[in-house]
Amino acid sequence: MPERDRDRRSRPLYAVLIDADNIPAKYAAPILKEITSFGEPALRRVYGDWSSGRLNNWSKVVRDLGLVAHQETANTVGKNASDIGLVIDAMDILHTGRFDGFVLVSSDSDFTALANRVRENGLDVIGIGEKKAPEALRNVCNRFILIENIVDEPVQPKAAESGRAPSATVSGKVAPIEAVPLILQAMDRIEQDDEWYAMGQIGQYITAEHPDFDTRTYGKRKLSDLVMELKRFEAKKIGNQLHIRRVD
């Protein structure tokens, strides 16, 4: 696609490739909703052996959501035909030059090499999978989103009568205090003399080092919500941006 056409787009265009053998159908709608929050899922394909009967739940979802199902039949014992078919398609799509990035929906480490290849070609790779997804797959993506965070939106905390933020964590979430080392590490990597750090820049540094970082993992909707609950930092607005500093 010519560069001028890409420049005219206000939202990045993504090719979404879903491994139906690895991802439950019940997550399809929340996943697509999540993708639309950061880009346009222009191409949406689902791969699996539709003749096996194991993907009956997916068959209805494909119809309801307007996805494109690709039939992949294993001709060799021990080989995952869906994985192979998805990778072949991905390479064909990559060479069209039409898309700004790929969204790979799977928890399978077999797609690590594919994600690496796409990034080598200068495109973004967003991974979406379950907590069981291996570190190798998470780290090779520009960003990796846990399905558990998509389907289990954090509860908006209510301030206590005393005005103090509640310290209790949402069930199944990581305690906010666990994020402190990540924030401090980001501050250490930002080269500046000022003790006040822009919140947005801190978020960028954390995500660059930890592609699977997500404030929803800690039961918070935004990084500012997470930081404001911690006693280790002080916050203030400078212009239109929120800045924080350490409180030792």
Image (cartoon, helix red, strand yellow):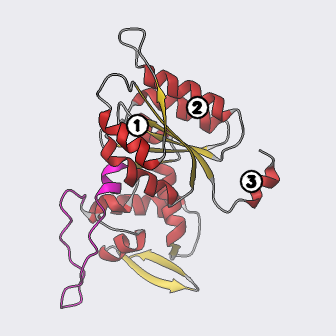
Q: Determine whether, in the image, residue 161 is placed left or right of residue 226.
A: left
Mark 1 highlights which residue? 106
Q: What kind of residue is marked 1?
A: Ser
> Quick one: 8 or 213, which is closer to the camera?
8
The amino acid type found where label 2 is placed reads Ala
Mark 2 — residue?
Answer: 90
What amino acid is labelled 3 in the image? Arg
Mark 3, secondary structure of its residue: helix
Q: Look at the numbered disc 2 and give the secondary structure of its residue.
A: helix
- Pick whichever, 129 or 227, lies toward us: 129
Say few, some or many: other residues with alpha carbon within 10 Å of mark 1 (under 14 / 14 to 19 / 20 or more).
many
User: Which residue corresponds to the image point at 35% horizontal and 77% vertical from the top-left?
Assistant: 228
Crowd around label 3: few <14 · some 14–19 · many ≥20 (10 Å): some
Earlier-in-chain disc, 1 versus 2: 2
Q: Main secondary structure of the magenta part?
A: loop
Picture residue at 72% right of the left edge, 39% below the top: 97
Q: Quadrant of the C terminus?
A: bottom left
Question: Residue 128: in sight, yes or no?
Answer: no
Residue 100 position, x and y percent, is: 65, 47
Q: What label sits on residue 6 in the rendered view?
A: 3
Residue at 46% in and 25% down: 71
**Residue depicted at x 53% and y 59%:** 38
Percent x, y for residue 224? 41, 73
The span from disc 3 to disc 1 (Cα, nearest Å) is 27 Å
Q: Residues within 10 Å of mark 2 (few under 14, many from 20)?
A: some
Count of picture labels: 3
In which quadrant will I find the N terminus?
A: top right
Q: Is residue 118 above or below residue 145?
A: above
**Magenta stretch in the rendered image:** 146-174
Q: Which mark is residue 169?
A: none
